[in-house]
Image (cartoon, rainbow, N blue to C red):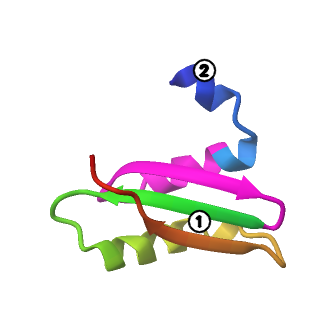
Amino acid sequence: MEDATVSLPPRLRRTLELVYGVEGVTAARVWHWPGRVAVGVRPAVLSAPSELLRRVESAVAGLREPEETWDFGLLETE
């Protein structure tokens, strides 16, 4: 996994670092297209999904570019 992380663009790597730093996130995925970013997270068992998404959105707010759309959602459980 370290090799995959090293090859990520710095902004996406930082996004993942911030998302995984939010308590209650057990898995995360980030997708990026020109002008758009999508973040998916899997919550821990005792985490309220809506509250977790708010905290994730707040954690990455500083990375947003003007005119860029960010979407947040839940990943399916395994």
Vertical order, 19 against 5 (above or below): below
Task: Residue at 71%, 55% (x, y): give it.
Answer: 32
Name the spot of residue 36 as percent of width and height, x first. 74, 67
Residue under label 2, please give it. Answer: 3
Task: Residue at 83%, 61% (x, y): give it.
Answer: 34
Q: Is residue 31 visible?
A: yes
* Mark 2 secondary-structure assignment: helix
Separation (CA) of disc 1 from disc 2? 23 Å
- Residue furthest to the top in view is 3
Residue under label 1, please give it. Answer: 60
- Three-letter residue code for mark 1: Val
Local crowd at mark 1 within 10 Å, few (<14), some, or many (≥20)?
Answer: some
Vertical order, 75 against 4 (above or below): below
Ranked by sequence position, the earlier of labels 1 and 2 is 2
> Does 29 appear in magenta?
yes
State which region is magenta. Answer: 13-35
* Mark 1 secondary-structure assignment: loop
Task: Residue at 84%, 78% (x, y): give it.
Answer: 67
State if disc 2 and disc 1 touch (CB < 8 Å).
no
Report how many numbered discs are placed on residues in the image: 2
- Three-letter residue code for mark 2: Asp
